[in-house]
Image (spheres, coloured by chain):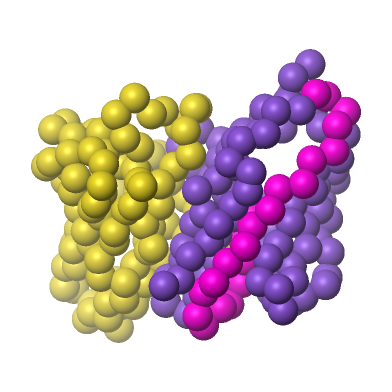
Amino acid sequence: EDKVVQSPLSLVVHEGDTVTLNCSYEVTNFRSLLWYKQEKKAPTFLFMLTSSGIEKKSGRLSSILDKKELFSILNITATQTGDSAVYLCAVEAWYDMRFGAGTRLTVKP
Amino acid sequence: GAVVSQHPSRVICKSGTSVKIECRSLDFQATTMFWYRQFPKKSLMLMATSNEGSKATYEQGVEKDKFLINHASLTLSTLTVTSAHPEDSSFYICSALGQGETSDNSPLHFGNGTRLTVT
């Protein structure tokens, strides 16, 4: 059965720390892997990854996909309190999209 | 736990017809459900929020007469696209929160989405 597993489920760090969030998947007909930041009721799109080994970067956030080992990581460097949120990983297949359970990140001042 | 089932996963319909999409929470009671539409570049636009037993709250710019949302029970919300047109073709996805959960303190539980194609 297709599944997307995120780890850890929750994480507490202090401002300035670097964090790595993990997403592993088993999905047939893989098209892409997406990272979102859950802000209130709607996830904000962060990255879309389709090819292995190519890092996507946006400010302090970066992400990379390994299609051989079936996982992706989301890195956040120099964390700030505003980074506190649930981060969602989703895998798009040809006909559907599966979300992981999310990682709750808390950044303390 | 917290499984959300969305049905159908794919639907093709003719212009002018109506399509109903179901979102069910299988192992929890969903007091709040959200409906989204995915746009190119993969952003998810929130269309509406539905609470069991009350009228849905629509986001600005979403036509409530076109996108009918019903949340008749704690485990089922439906989105009906009425008089569908080709521009309504998109990927629609729902999410849910259980009792005691808020979007501030809990991850949203997502369905697998429905790809609607209007010909």
Residue shown at 81% from the left, 32% from the top: A79
Q: Is residue B39 visible?
A: no
Q: Work out whether A58 lies above or below B99.
A: below
Does the image show residue B98? yes
Q: Is residue A9 above or below residue B21?
A: above
Query: Is residue B54 placed above or below A6 in the rendered structure?
Result: above
The residue lying at 25 percent from left, 66 percent from top is B7
User: So how many labels did they put on this image?
Assistant: 0
Image hue for chain B: yellow
Give the residue displayed 38% in from the left and 63% down from the top. Answer: B113
Q: Position of residue B67 (x, y in %)?
A: 25, 53
Query: Is B1 on the left-hand or right-hand side of B45?
Result: left
Q: Which chain did the renderer colour purple?
A: A
Question: Left or right: where does residue A19 sit relative to residue B80?
Answer: right
Up-down relation of residue B93 to residue A67 (above or below): above
Q: Is residue B99 left or right of residue A43?
A: left
The image quadrant where one finds the C terminus of chain B is: bottom left
Residue A44 position within the rendered picture, expressed as x and y whole percent measured from the top left? 59, 46
The residue lying toward the viewer, choosing from B74 and A14, is A14
Q: Magenta region: which residues?
A: A14-36
Is A65 positioned to the left or the right of B59 in the image? Answer: right
* Magenta run includes residue A30: yes
